[in-house]
């Protein structure tokens, strides 16, 4: 059993490692900020609802307080009418007692509403504090995300430049130039080799004709000069004496 547990742990660790390699810190941060903004939206909605409950409790407390005062006023009016003989004292006492009972009920209800109001306002204050903290965190994380993106761009560019300078990138300019130099050297050596082979394969007749052709231009020029002098009645010796 322990062996299987160890194998499971190893597989789990390797899976987590593979996931970590696939995770992009920037995308993870962006998703985290989106989640925080969703939480902020939900918190703002909850805050509005709690504040509404506090307002409702405050209004209900005022209604009950006003009704309690109204019942007390009615009890006083009933007793005054009894004093003036408008109604019997027994009837006035009965009705005034009922008014005081209603007054006490509304006083108790007003106290309950005030307690609810204080509780809801306390909850709203706490929730508002959490919302402010959440807003601050979102703002801070957004600034950090901008910094992270900038650092990522700089590090990526720096890495690429350093790879090129170090010759790590196989497609770098330095590598291509080295391969070109090697290819040119091979072509030059091959051309020289073909030239040597061509020189070795010349026949004896080609060598004779090449030797004769090398002086043919000078011979033709000398013959043309002698023919011109003969036509003018000049001799080689005469030409030499006049020149002297």
Image (cartoon, rainbow, N blue to C red):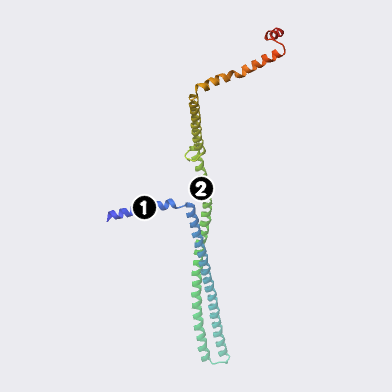
Q: Quadrant of the C terminus?
A: top right
- In this rendering, the count of numbered labels is 2
25 or 88: nearer the viewer? 25
Q: Residue furthest left?
A: 1
Residue 217 in the image: state x and y as whole percent: 62, 19
**Image height of 39 relative to 190, above or below:** below
Residue 37 in the image: state x and y as whole percent: 51, 60
Q: Secondary structure at mark 1?
A: helix
Which residue is denoted by mark 1 in the rendering?
A: 13
Which residue is denoted by mark 2 in the rendering?
A: 152
Residue 240, image quadrant: top right
Badge 2 local density, few (<14 within 10 Å), some, or many (20+)? some
Query: Which residue corresponds to the image point at 42% horizontal and 52% vertical from the top-left?
Result: 20
* Residue 88: mark in rendering: none
Badge 1 local density, few (<14 within 10 Å), some, or many (20+)? few
125 or 14: nearer the viewer? 14
Residue 46 in the image: state x and y as whole percent: 50, 67
Q: Earlier in the sequence, mark 1 or mark 2?
A: 1
Query: Which residue corresponds to the image point at 36% horizontal and 54% vertical from the top-left?
Result: 12
* Badge 1 vs badge 2, beta-carbon distance below 8 Å: no
Q: Quadrant of the N terminus?
A: bottom left
**Image height of 24 relative to 125, above or below:** above
Residue 110 in the image: state x and y as whole percent: 51, 76
Query: Which residue corresponds to the image point at 50% horizontal and 23% vertical from the top-left?
Result: 203
**Image height of 45 relative to 95, above or below:** above
**Image height of 134 relative to 189, above or below:** below
């Amino acid at each position: 059993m322990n062996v299987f547990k160890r194998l499971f742990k190893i597989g789990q660790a390797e899976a987590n490692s593979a996931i970590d390699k696939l995770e992009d810190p920037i995308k993870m941060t962006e998703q985290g900020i989106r989640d925080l903004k969703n939480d902020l939206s939900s918190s703002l909605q909850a805050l509005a609802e709690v504040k509404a409950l506090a307002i409702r409790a405050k209004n209900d407390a005022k209604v009950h307080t006003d009704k309690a005062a109204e019942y007390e006023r009615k009890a006083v009016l009933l007793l005054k009418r009894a004093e003036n003989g408008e109604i019997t004292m027994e009837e006035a006492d009965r009705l005034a007692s009922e008014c005081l009972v209603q007054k006490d009920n509304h006083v108790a209800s007003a106290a309950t509403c005030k307690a609810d109001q204080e509780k809801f306002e306390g909850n709203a204050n706490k929730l508002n504090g959490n919302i402010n903290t959440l807003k601050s965190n979102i703002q801070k994380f957004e600034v950090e995300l901008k910094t992270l993106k900038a650092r990522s761009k700089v590090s990526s560019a720096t890495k690429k430049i350093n790879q090129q300078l170090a010759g790590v990138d196989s497609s770098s300019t330095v590598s291509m130039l080295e391969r070109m130099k090697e290819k040119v050297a091979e072509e030059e050596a091959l051309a020289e080799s073909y030239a040597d082979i061509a020189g070795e394969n010349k026949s004896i007749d080609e060598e004779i004709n090449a030797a004769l052709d090398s002086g043919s231009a000078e011979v033709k020029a000398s013959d043309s000069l002698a023919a011109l002098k003969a036509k003018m009645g000049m001799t080689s010796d005469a030409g030499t004496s006049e020149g002297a």
